[in-house]
Structures are given as C-alpha cells and as structure tokens.
Image (cartoon, rainbow, N blue to C red):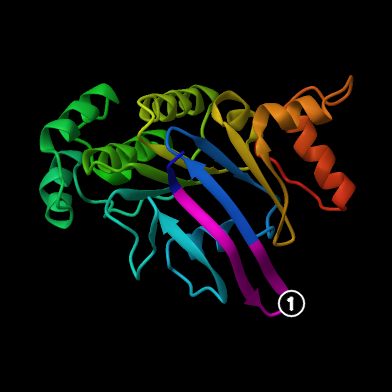
C-alpha cells in the first residue's frame, strides 16, 4: 500500500527533552490522529515533518520521496491560527495566493467558498475561527493538496463547526488518493473519523495502531470511548491530560 507520509525514527534533542525514534506511516485514503498531552512532542513532530526545525536523526518521506528543505506543494498545513493578513478580503485571497502555487485551481476555490458558505465581502480578520479554518482548507484543496497536516484544528470550535470539519476531512479522503494527519486534544473527533491513532508520551510513541483495535483492546465497563481510553492511559503514565471541551 502506498503511503502519503512515512516518518522513520525521528529524533530531536531539546535540553532535557528528547523526541525519541518516532515512526509511523499514513496510507493513501487514511486519517491518522496524533494525540498526547502538552509537551508530549506533537508540535516537535509536526515541525520536524515540515522541516521547520532540523532533526537530529531520522527520515521523512512524502509519497515515497525524501523530504527536502521544503515540503512538496501537494502537502498543505492547516494550523489553528490563520496565517493570512487579517485585512485581506476573502474575495481577494484568490489573486494573492495563486502566485505561490503551480497547480492553483481558481474554479475549485470559488466552488469551495460557496460550499463552505464563506462571505467573500468579509475581511479575514472578521471571520469566526470555524470559518477561518474552512478558508485555509479551501486554499489547501484549491492547490490540489494530497496530504493535509492539521495542527489542533478543532481546538476552540463549537460542536457544530467540529462536525462540519470532520465531514470535510472524510470527504477529502473518500477517493483513497489523499490523506490526513490530524493532531488534536479532542479525541472524540478522532473517534468519528480516524483510521489510526499515534499516541505520544514524553517524546515516545506508546501506541500506534488502528483506532478500532485500540478501542477493542482497552474498552471495558468504565472505558467506553477513545476519549476515556486516552485519559486512562495518560493517568497510567502519570501524565496530566488537559482535554478541550
């Protein structure tokens, strides 16, 4: 099975913290959830994948090819904070960003703006958090991204907006040619959409398995959901897990 992303033995030293031999794959059509408490190494892992920081060891492959100084144009990162100028109008964004992407699809961008019910007359700074996330996803899909890397995208969103985003991601991978890496504290969202879960504790992977296998292995009368299981596993590790509401 072809993978959109292969992470092999990623290691990074930060003073007393060490990200140690982190390895996982994301197959085409798959959604992988990256979970862990604050300080577990999620952000470090994502930064290493994006070449924002230099790794001390390991390798990252995108669609079977080694990562260079920049991630490929068919890989898009969506963070929880919008990175466009707040004064730009939604209607202006097409003209601004298309210069940066070889495969920009203006018609697709216009279609997604309509589909996501984004108000083109609004400045980006006027958009709600949920609408901001949808705008960044619209840009990602309009540049023909085949791998989405999402860093805490549902943090602070209301349940309706979270459900909408989960639906967008399921639709994105439905043709089995695209994939998603989804870092989040909200494991209830992963329960709806993730195929696999990678669980980090203190810079090390404690679990890397199919979501359904994890639920089947750990569930009991008290641990009924993925959320329950992740909290329980943190408690066993002696780690406080601050989950979002």
Q: Position of residue 235 (x, y in %)?
A: 86, 45
In this picture, residue 39 sits left or right of residue 167:
right
Q: Looking at the image, which residue is at 50% across and 65% down?
A: 59
Asked where in the image residue 90 lies, by quadrant, the reply is top left
Q: Nearer the viewer, residue 126 or 182?
A: 182
Establish if 68 lies above or below 27. Answer: below
Q: Is residue 156 in sight in this rendering?
A: no
Image quadrant occupied by the C terminus: top right
Establish if 25 lies above or below 213. Answer: below
In this picture, residue 127 sits left or right of residue 196:
left
**Magenta span covers which residues?**
5-21
Residue ranking furthest to the bottom = 15
Question: What predominant SS class does the magenta segment belong to?
Answer: strand
Q: Is residue 32 in sight in this rendering?
A: yes
Q: Position of residue 237 (x, y in %)?
A: 86, 51
Count of numbered labels shown in the rendering: 1
Establish if 166 lies above or below 21. Answer: above
Which residue is labeled 1 in the image?
16
Q: Looking at the image, which residue is at 43% across and 42% down?
A: 2
Q: Nearer the viewer, residue 117 or 138?
A: 138
Q: Position of residue 238 (x, y in %)?
A: 88, 53
In this picture, residue 155 sits left or right of residue 13:
left
Question: SS of the residue at dot 1?
Answer: loop
How crowded is the residue under tag 1: few (<14 C-alpha within 10 Å), some, or many (20+)?
few
Residue ranking furthest to the top = 221
Q: Position of residue 39 (x, y in %)?
A: 68, 60
In this picture, residue 183 sits left or right of residue 207:
left
């Amino acid at each position: 099975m072809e993978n959109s992303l292969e992470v092999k033995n990623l290691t990074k030293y930060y003073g007393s913290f060490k990200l140690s031999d982190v390895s996982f794959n994301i197959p085409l059509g798959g959604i992988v959830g990256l979970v862990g408490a604050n300080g577990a190494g999620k952000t470090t892992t994502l930064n290493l994948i994006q070449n924002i920081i230099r790794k001390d060891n390991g390798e990252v492959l995108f669609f079977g090819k080694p990562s260079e100084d920049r991630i490929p144009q068919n890989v898009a990162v969506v963070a929880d904070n919008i990175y466009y100028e707040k004064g730009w109008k939604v209607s202006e964004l097409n003209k601004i960003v298309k210069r940066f992407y070889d495969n920009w699809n203006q018609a697709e961008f216009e279609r997604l703006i309509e589909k996501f019910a984004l108000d083109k007359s609004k400045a980006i700074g006027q958009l709600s958090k949920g609408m901001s996330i949808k705008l960044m996803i619209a840009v990602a899909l309009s540049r023909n991204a085949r791998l989405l890397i999402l860093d805490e995208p549902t943090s602070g969103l209301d349940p309706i907006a979270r459900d909408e985003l989960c639906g967008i991601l399921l639709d994105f991978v439905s043709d089995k040619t695209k994939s998603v890496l989804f870092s989040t504290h909200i494991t209830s969202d992963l329960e709806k959409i993730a195929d696999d879960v990678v669980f980090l504790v203190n810079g090390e992977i404690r679990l890397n398995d199919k979501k359904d296998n994890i639920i089947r292995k750990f569930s009991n009368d008290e641990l009924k959901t993925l959320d329950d299981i992740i909290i329980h596993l943190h408690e066993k590790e002696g780690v406080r897990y601050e989950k979002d509401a």
